[in-house]
Image (spheres, grey):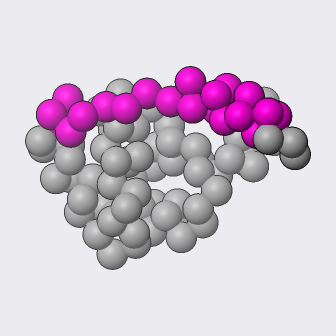
């Protein structure tokens, strides 16, 4: 990839990203999300809490995350490949 192509690609990717500060997250939902992921991967707490707060299904390719939170009764998560098969 040429330098200018990388720059163009980077702009297209990063222009679609929205950063949400922690204060917009509900404290109770955040606590629940921490409990769900603390033994799987705490770095995923933001994804789980945002999915919970917005009442959306989280799409992921992280098998350990999917299995870990499902064991803790969190059902609003789907493997991305499964999603693609159902579209």
Indicate whether residue 17 is drawn in magenta. Answer: yes
Q: Residue furthest right?
A: 1
* Residue 14 percent location from the top left of the image: 57, 32
Q: Which quadrant is home to the N terminus?
A: top right
Q: Residue furthest bottom?
A: 39
How many marks the image carries: the answer is: 0
Side of 50 where 24 appears, left or right: left
Residue name at image x 79 percent, y 33 percent: 4
Q: Residue furthest front?
A: 3
Q: Which quadrant is home to the C terminus?
A: top right
Indicate whether residue 76 is drawn in magenta. Answer: no
Front-lying residue, 10 or 55: 10
* Residue 61 percent location from the top left of the image: 64, 56
Residue name at image x 50 percent, y 30 percent: 17
Q: Which residues are magenta?
A: 4-26
Residue 25, visible in the rendered structure = no
Residue name at image x 31 percent, y 44 percent: 49
Side of 73 where 29 appears, left or right: left
Residue 39, visible in the rendered structure = yes
Q: Quadrant of residue 43?
A: bottom left
Residue name at image x 20 percent, y 29 percent: 24
Q: Residue furthest left?
A: 27
* Residue 54 percent location from the top left of the image: 35, 28
Q: Is residue 24 above or below residue 41?
A: above
- Magenta span main SS: helix
Side of 13 where 55 appears, left or right: left
* Residue 9 percent location from the top left of the image: 74, 33
């Amino acid at each position: 990839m040429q330098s200018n192509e990388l720059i163009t690609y980077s702009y297209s990717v990063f222009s679609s990203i929205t950063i949400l500060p922690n204060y917009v997250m509900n404290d109770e939902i955040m606590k629940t999300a921490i409990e769900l992921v603390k033994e799987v991967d705490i770095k995923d707490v933001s994804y789980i809490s945002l999915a919970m707060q917005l009442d959306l299904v989280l799409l992921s390719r992280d098998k350990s995350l999917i299995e870990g939170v499902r064991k803790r009764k969190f059902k609003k998560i789907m493997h991305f490949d499964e999603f693609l098969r159902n579209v």
